[in-house]
Image (cartoon, grey):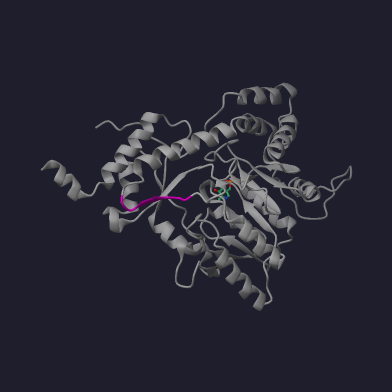
Amino acid sequence: MQKEERIFLSPPHMSGNEQFYIKEAFRSNWIAPLGSNVDGFERELAHYNGVKQVEVFNSGTAAIHLALRLLDVRSGDTVFCSSLTFVASVNPILYQGGTPVLIDSEADTWNMSPQALVRALEDAQKQGKLPKAIIVVHLYGQSAQMDELLAIGDAYGIPIVEDAAESLGSTYKGRKSGTLGKFGIFSFNGNKIITTSGGGALLSNDEKALDKATFIATQARDPATHYQHSEIGYNYRMSNILSGIGRAQLEVLDLRVAQRRAVFTTYDEALRNIPGVAFQPELAGTKSNRWLTALTVDPEQTEITPQEIIEHMTEANIEVRPVWKPMHLQPLFEDVPYYPHEVGNSVSDQLFEQGICLPSGTNMSDADQQRVIKRFKELLTPKKLVLNGTL
Ligand SMILES: *Cc1c(COP(=O)(O)O)cnc(C)c1O
């Protein structure tokens, strides 16, 4: 049988206006990690998000690393981080020689559990070793419980870095995701809601800190005509060509959010009545960009495991992925402290065991989405019902 065309999880979706900005970079010959597209993209991102300043870099990971540098994370320091995330949230802690402490999720957002965070901070205080920062991830576009987390951070005087790599365009109580903590970061990797093929941004209302970030990202070159350096730097800047792609992508971000949310709604309406299926919730007062439609499948009710669903979907040339494998279950972080939501109840373990992400690209046709839905329903229809149907 001829395989049907592949449906990707989250492919890039160009606006059509990218070439305009790319041409401008070529026309002006700013084929460099600086120029009018870099400046323009930073200004437009700051305006869109309602923050004083944004600096763009060559990856979201680099932006997280710079945030930790600005917060003076050093060898021997600890940094708290959401456990249910992509490894890029945590790796920069290791780059700085720090030790992560991993915090579980709670069921209402799938993001950092405030009560687990409190337990971890109480322990850290007893040990006289409070963290330098708390990295809060907004998974699949859904904002974490920021009021609670910010209040806890404030009570202990610990700054929050928002890993908003997946939640660009989402809001929390009317404010843009990524703008509530001391620093926020975005990613423009090829799979994200808008892309520059690769890239990231750091945002804050602390303009001095952001100037310092770009200084560090430019090999920490001292202001001297000769090449002089007093501290460690990196080459983390974003190309003027790629910033041009970002400018055209940002023009359609609100449209992309509406389209991703429409993809979610179509799945939700078609599949929510299947026993054992539950979609990632949207917390009251928040608006998720629904970067990926994520859901859990309880095999006790569905008679099929999430892993089997993924295998069957892959056979049908449909890209379905498990939810991120939590960091506390990774060999890399075997020896790292972990705080579950409640003692003996790890929410992220359960989300990992039962969670899958469906194709959520904004350039997926209605027919393609119906193909996913049809296959999903076939896989989840309990066998007894099929038998009844044939009687
Ligand atoms: C994509 C992603 C990143 C890192 O982004 P890159 O631009 O690929 O370095 C960080 N955190 C999360 C949660 C992500 O999904």
Along the viewing direction, whichever of 227 and 62 lies nearer the viewer? 62
Which residue range is magenta in the image?
A: 275-281
Position above or below: 339 against 243: below
**Residue 333 rendering spot, x and y as whole percentages:** 53, 64
Based on the picture, tell me whether residue 76 belongs to the magenta stretch. no
* Residue found at x 68% / y 67%: 77
Would residue 97 be seen by someone viewing this image from the given angle? no
Residue 142 seen from this side? yes
29, 88: nearer the viewer:
88
Residue at 58% over, 36% down: 195
> Total number of numbered labels?
0
On the image, the x and y values in percent for residue 23 come to 67, 22
Q: Residue furthest front?
A: 284
> Which percent across, then down, holds residue 374?
30, 37
Note whether 336 is above or below 233 in the view shown. Answer: below
Q: Is residue 178 left or right of residue 281?
A: right
The C terminus: image quadrant: top left
Q: Nearer the viewer, residue 88 or 260?
A: 260
Residue 230 in the figure: left or right of residue 313: right
Q: Who's the residue at 59% across and 60% down the image?
A: 81
Indicate whether residue 280 is drawn in magenta.
Answer: yes
Left or right: 162, with 371 as reference point = right
Which residue sits furthest bottom?
A: 126
**Front-most of residues 389 and 4:** 389
Q: Residue furthest right?
A: 225
Residue 147, how many percent across, how many down?
A: 63, 57
Q: Please identify the quadrant where the N terminus is shown.
A: top left
